[in-house]
Amino acid sequence: MQKIKIVHLVEALGGGVYTYFINLTHVLAADPRFEVTVIYSDRREQIDPGRVAQDFHPQTKLIVIPMMREISPSGDYKAFKSIRKELLKIKPDILHVHSSKAGILGRFAHLFSRSIRAKLFYTPHGYSFLRKDVGFLKRTIFFTIEFFTQKLCGGTIVACGDTELFHSKKIGKAVLVRNGINHAAITAQPQLKTETIERIGILGRTTAQRDPQLFNRLALNNPQIEFVWIGDGELRHLLTAPNISITGWFKENKKGLERLEKLDVYLQTSLWEGLPIAVLEAAAREIPVIATNIIGNKDIIKPGITGYLFEDAEDFQVFLKALEPRAVREKIGQAAAKRNRLLFDSTTNFNKLAALYVKSLKTS
């Protein structure tokens, strides 16, 4: 039986997207029906090129094409030509592009290659037009680019969360395949809850998206608690509170998760998200979550039941106080883990994605 050739294209291979791809390849590349290739850029600071082959499923074919995060006419054109060349060589049946940069480059490479008849899929992982660190004009430009790229190139948008699906339907044909994590791989038992909240933290890059200034302000307001930023990034200089520690990047994904498991409360200060993997990782380990009331976070947390969503620093203090009793943290943590297993399991959800691929080929 001839295998179905699937190509995934991603520039932003770091943080939660990296975990997404680990879980994705361990479902799809393990399926005897598929031949899976991942084309990615190794320009992100979190990527250890030597570990990608170890972390992804061993049957995954890996191709590196340098892509730049920011707009670069010459660099983007060079990446476009390289992507198109690889696609013409592979001749995939399925092309699935991820995030804004690879989403645009990959879809236009598909559009300008008539011999490539792959079914096209696109997952935004958080739309740029929902960013809160840029003005209205830029957001309008980002939306216009997404809208007309979809109209020109076609294909199906695969939203990674319920709210992303809502916005995707404004742009084109869209379906929902939620992000997920591999619950079967979680071997650590939930930590015995401390009598008081001693350690609060976040996992990810220190970027404008995760609002390190807000994280710093909350740390200053709670000097008796240790705040931990698990990761690093270009805005680490904004984390000045004396009770904040920054771990830096770990070469192994599991090392960061080991630090996550030591938290009493997980704090997500993001300004925008797709569906944050780090919040899923915390919830799966029965760590209660307090997160900003934004797209993505809202798709994971049921307020007062599996965590809390806050609007400002005052809100945060109210919810932090509510979580002080150990029994409350245990109850919320257990409820979060239960909901996680039902809705956000990578094996279940990526098998749905596999079925979507197969169906698209049968209906062509």
Image (tube, rainbow, N blue to C red):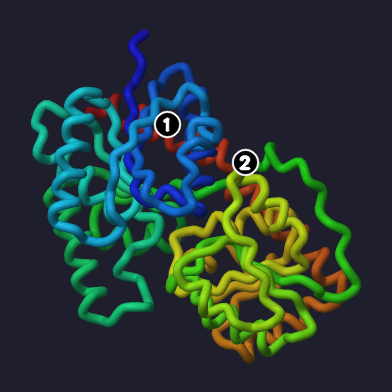
**Amino acid type of the residue tagged 1 in the rendering:** Ala
Mark 2 → mark 1, Cα distance in angstroms: 19 Å
**Amino acid type of the residue tagged 2 in the rendering:** Asn
Relative to 323, is 48 above or below?
A: above
Quarter of the image for residue 3 reads top left
- Mark 2 burial class by Cα count in 10 Å: few <14, some 14-19, many 20+: many
Mark earlier in primary sequence (2, 1) = 2
Left or right side of 148 for 92: right
Residue at 81% x, 53% y is 190
Residue at 23% x, 67% y is 143
Relative to 35, is 304 above or below?
A: below
Left or right side of 28 for 119: left
Instruction: Tell me, yes or no, if residue 117 can be seen here.
Output: no
Residue at 73% x, 69% y is 265
Residue 195 on image: x %, y %: 90, 72
Tell me the SS state at disc 1.
helix
Pointer 2: what residue?
Answer: 182
Pointer 1: what residue?
Answer: 355
Quadrant in which the C terminus appears: top left
Residue 325 on image: x %, y %: 86, 76
Q: Nearer the viewer, residue 83 or 155?
A: 83
Relative to 20, is 115 above or below?
A: above
Residue 71 on image: x %, y %: 21, 61
Residue at 59% x, 60% y is 248
Q: Nearer the viewer, residue 117 or 359?
A: 117
